[in-house]
Amino acid sequence: MSDYVLELKGITKIFPGIKALDNVHFQLKKGEIHALMGENGAGKSTFIKVITGVHKAEEGSMFLDGKEVNFKNPKEAQAAGIAAIYQHVTAYPHLTVTENIFMGHEKVQKGTGRILWNQMHAEANELLRQLSADFDATTEMGTLSVAQQQMVEIAKALSMKARIIIMDEPTAALTKRESEELYKIAEKLKDDGASIIFISHRFEDMYRLATRVTVFRDSKYIGSYDVNGITNEDLIVAMVGREITQLFPKPEIKIGEEVLKVENLSRAGYFKDVTFHVKKGEILGLTGLVGAGRTEVCETIFGVEQKEAGRIYFNGKEVQIKGPLQAMNLGIGYLPEDRQKQGLILDWGIGQNITLPIIDKMTKYGIMNEKKERELGKSLAEKVDTKAVTIFDKASSLSGGNQQKVVVAKLLALDLKVLILDEPTKGVDVGAKAAIYEIMGELAKQGYAIIMVSSEMPEILGMCDRIVVMCDGRVTGELTREEATQEAILELGMAKTVHSKG
């Protein structure tokens, strides 16, 4: 009897012109949560697709309980008890939870082929009960939160008697509280005998759940380690192939005059009496727990939503910003938190995305100057070190980190003075994070005033000159770089009243 419920040896997968997997190995024990980590492009997604029968490897072998298997399609992998839950839930939003859970393996009456709805609803509700869900199986899928939809995907895996569950970046779009709920579910599944491959960029996911971690880099297997025996530094070296001794390359910059100031800014139901300012060459951190109102404040400054009270000053003069176009014309740019929905047109090329904000400057008499557009797109893509074959590559083909770089390049196409960056490193790997921090530092050197909204304490402490903390729609305190500690920020982030300095 094998020690491993799943084992892969020497797996190689080749696509035209690229080795997506190059002689990789993996071993999963029964009842184990095993983390799989690596930068975007390391080969993790292709690896999942080999396990689940989507892709067939050119070389190597896969074993279930010590017996070699060779899945021809995903149906065969499902029948063997393998299920995958992806970061972006592939659900049918207009169907019920029951219909989503049993899609493709409906309960039918023998002989008549009639669908046994009552039995399916009862089983679906029982699965949801086991997962401590707070919604019913007759609920329409599209009305659920991302966390609840992931719960339905887990219920679907359980309905198919899955004993190996692959979770691909499941916490990327979840709040801390929702992530904690997912951790409990994963641990319960493990206690019930399931084996879990947990793919994540987040070290806290690995430390919280996994006993072992395997690292891929550049499509190759780097190693497998006991979580208790590997440090953050060792893991970073394994993932990126070099030491990131300075993950936060914060340059020392002489900070200039005030560029943007908001005074007693209010929007009913979202935030009240918010006051702060940012200066030329300064990186101002705006932080607090999820739901504190940070994004809503930034959207109001940018004109996506309208303030109900308060004042906004730009270069010392009060301004009334009625929409994003007016904000950009003034010199304010905004990188939204959801790059895929709000920052990019995924079916467009990299160059087209970058030059979109200034498309009017690329045309004459209604005719696009394609040569000028290409040259500018290429120049700005190179400026932020976007990794792509050509600027004609679709934005959808890029890794998360490179998509984020394209959104930054879009901002650089404009003549801006203030950059608002909302969760600029969300969902990107450690190497891409370092690259984005470097870009931020360079932009600050060039005189941009930067507001960085972030929930990640290390980057707030590592990159910001000053930190403004919010809680429940109010500013509860402000800290200098020297005053800022994790404890001080957390205390202000959970405070209900304003802490005045001194």
Image (cartoon, rainbow, N blue to C red):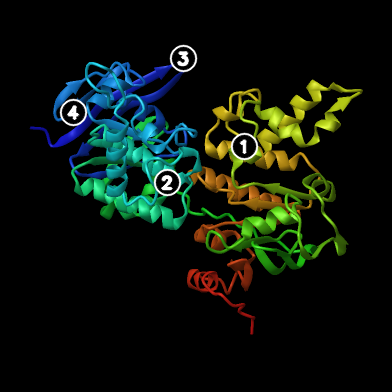
Do the residues bearing badges 3 and 4 touch, measured as CB atoms within 8 Å? no
Question: x, y percentage for residue 255?
Answer: 74, 64
The residue indicated by pointer 3 is: 16
The residue indicated by pointer 1 is: 385
Callout 4, which amino acid?
Leu
Q: Secondary structure at mark 4?
A: strand
State how far apart marks 1 and 4 are (Cα): 42 Å
State how far apart marks 3 and 1 are (Cα): 25 Å
State how far apart marks 3 and 4 are (Cα): 29 Å
Callout 3, which amino acid?
Pro
The residue indicated by pointer 4 is: 64
The residue at the point 22 percent across, 16 percent down is: 111
Check the image and name the residue furthest to the left: 1
Check the image and name the residue furthest to the right: 365
* Sequence-first disc among 3 and 1: 3
* Sequence-first disc among 3 and 4: 3
State how far apart marks 2 and 3 are (Cα): 38 Å
The residue at the point 79 percent across, 48 percent down is: 323
The residue indicated by pointer 2 is: 148
